Amino acid sequence: MSTARTWVGPSAPERLGILRGTRSVAIVGMSNKPSRASYFVATYLRSSSPYRVYFVNPVLDEVLGEKVYPSLAALPEVPDLVDVFRKDADLPGVAQEAVDVGAKTLWLQLGSWNEDAAAIAENAGLDVVMDRCVKIEHARFHGGLHLAGFNTGVVSSRRQVLA
């Protein structure tokens, strides 16, 4: 696999459209450790989004009081969006699994970029987003993003005057 980035992802309006069309999210590589990004994203999506959120990790049984499924195929419904927190070598396999279950979107988290995985998903008609965080994107489009990660309730493009 080449390290050069030639793939071009969806624009901001296209990402907003993906999120608006999503009803269910499967978090692949869910962790039970609060310090991990998947845990943080899961808590945000469960509390601040309308999505049905499922957790996928073959070595866990329960996280945040919810059942953890061993695979995408084991979920009670086909997820619209597959949010992936896995190492690079696993990404093409997860992309194929997302295709096989009929997901609509493959979303690779911040720091995840795998053009082979993107090609597998796109060739099967899935939307693909790479190197972006679902939590950040959702909050950005829904007025909940603040430098510290908190919702201030104020939507403005002006910098706050501190003195």
Image (cartoon, rainbow, N blue to C red):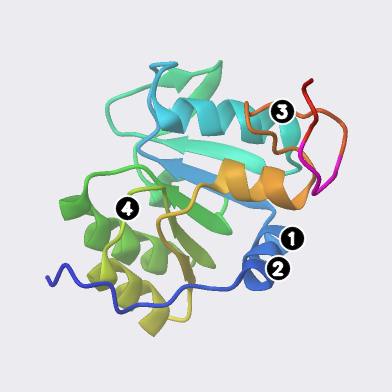
Residue on which the image places disc 2: 17
Q: Residue at x 29, y 33 (%)?
A: 58
Q: Nearer the viewer, mark 4 or mark 3?
A: 4
Badge 1 marks a residue whose secondary structure is: helix
Badge 4 marks a residue whose secondary structure is: loop
Q: Amino acid at mark 3?
A: Ser
Badge 3 marks a residue whose secondary structure is: helix
Looking at the image, is mark 4 or mark 2 earlier in the sequence?
A: 2
Left or right: 112, with 105 as reference point = left
Residue on which the image places disc 1: 20
Residue on which the image places disc 3: 47
Labels 2 and 1 touching (C-beta < 8 A): yes
The magenta segment is 155-159
Badge 2 local density, few (<14 within 10 Å), some, or many (20+)? few
Left or right: 68, with 7 as reference point = right
Badge 4 local density, few (<14 within 10 Å), some, or many (20+)? some
